[in-house]
Amino acid sequence: MSRECAFVFLLLLGCSAGNYTHTLWEHRCDPGSEIFACTAPNFLYKPNQNHSTLIVPETVRKVRLAYPTDKVIGRRDIITAYDATLHAALNRPLAVQITYVSMEHLEVPLDLEYADFSHNSIERVNAPPVNGSNYALRYLDLGGNGMDRIDSLSALVNLETLLLSGNHISTLDDSVLKSFTKLSTLNLASNSLVDISFTDMPASLEFLILRHNLIYGTLEFTGVNLPALKVLDVYNNLCGVLEVSALLSAAPKLEAIRLDGNYFSVKDAKAILEQLTDAGIEHDKFAKSNREEDDDEDHYFRTQQKLKVQEHIISGMLTVVNVCVIGWGFYQVYKSRGSTERGRETSSSV
């Protein structure tokens, strides 16, 4: 009897799970949310499958899905892609926010202006050049994804804010950066950048955030043109040389700089601080901030670095194990063949 009950329970569970995944749900904006953005926490979308529908007032052009997170029911991967089909189903909004849903595929519509797809699993963006048209996108947040290059963003020439913190970017494509002629804010914090060329940065930049990377050596500003730059953050890197006069020449409107967590000598640090103070530039005095959010970010960065190291260690161990298993297999085959040949020789001699 107990086995029959268990079987029925599992059958019902499987049916309910299937129903949750494939049944069309009709959603309306959370009451009152449409004043800011139409919010629907349990919208479902997977390409080539049944998906939810959203009843959006015609006057609402901003949509926020999978939010608030404490109202999301079921699995995390409720929206695996943002493409033309989903964009049309949402009544072609100008602004979209979909975070923490393990999204893997992002196709940028031409008319989308604001996009927050942070904390997902996106590795590349589908935004190919379109003859005779430009993407309207001005704000893009892809922080906390899996991107290691930015070349797939090259056609997004109207970008004004680009947030890419917490990815796996180790190099920057010079031509892509130069195409962002309207870019005001660029956040590349918590990546794997080893070297940075400021000559490739767009002249429109006002805020450049490079903290928590692996940038080493000299911060070179000779011949650089950043006439609009106001804030530069290179906290927690491996830099050891900065010529302040070259920096001030390259960025005459600079208001603040953050340098703590690098490898400047005591003598150089003192000289840098004096020059920055004389120029009226706000700085961190090479002292770590006591801000709580910085501590949280430091913890997050260290955790991500540990996870990366663990991944490399596990990958290396698996490689060694595979090699050992293959070697052991070859040895067993060789041993078996040797035994067979010796058996044949013994039989022939008898």
Image (cartoon, rainbow, N blue to C red):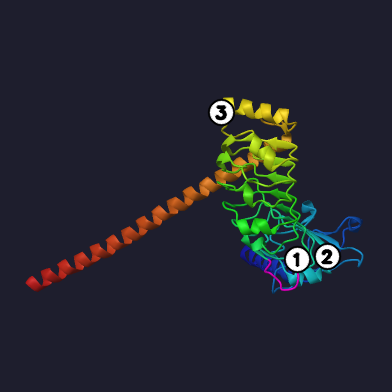
Q: Secondary structure at mark 2?
A: loop
Q: Are marks 2 and 1 in contact (CB under 8 Å)?
A: no
Query: Which quadrant of the figure contains the C terminus?
Result: bottom left
Give the residue drawn at x 61%, y 37%. Answer: 236
Q: Residue at x 58, y 48 (%)?
A: 193
* Magenta stretch bounds: 127-134
User: Which of pointers 3 and 1 lies earlier in the amino acid sequence?
Assistant: 1
Circle 3 residue:
265
Q: Position of residue 249 (x, y in %)?
A: 68, 40
Task: Pick whichever of labels 2 and 1 is earlier in the sequence.
Answer: 2
Q: Position of residue 293 (x, y in %)?
A: 72, 38
Q: CA distance from mark 3 to mark 1?
A: 46 Å
Task: Assign the magenta stretch its main secondary structure.
Answer: loop
Which residue position is annotated with label 2? 93
Point 65% across, 65% down: residue: 10
Can the viewer see residue 147 in this picture? no
Viewer-nearest residue: 260 or 27: 260
- Quote the CA–CA distance across marks 2 and 1: 14 Å
Q: Secondary structure at mark 3?
A: loop
Tag 1's secondary structure?
A: loop
> In front: 79, or 328?
79
Residue occupying the point 69% across, 66% down: 127
Image height check: is 297 above or below 102? above
In front: 173, or 37?
173
The location of residue 101, given as percent across then percent down, is 70, 58
Kindly indicate the quadrant of the structure image that contains residue 218.
top right
Amino acid type shown at disc 3: Ser
Which is in the foreground here, disc 2 or disc 1?
Answer: 1
Where residue 7 sits in the image (x, y, percent)? 64, 67
Q: CA distance from mark 2 to mark 3?
A: 52 Å
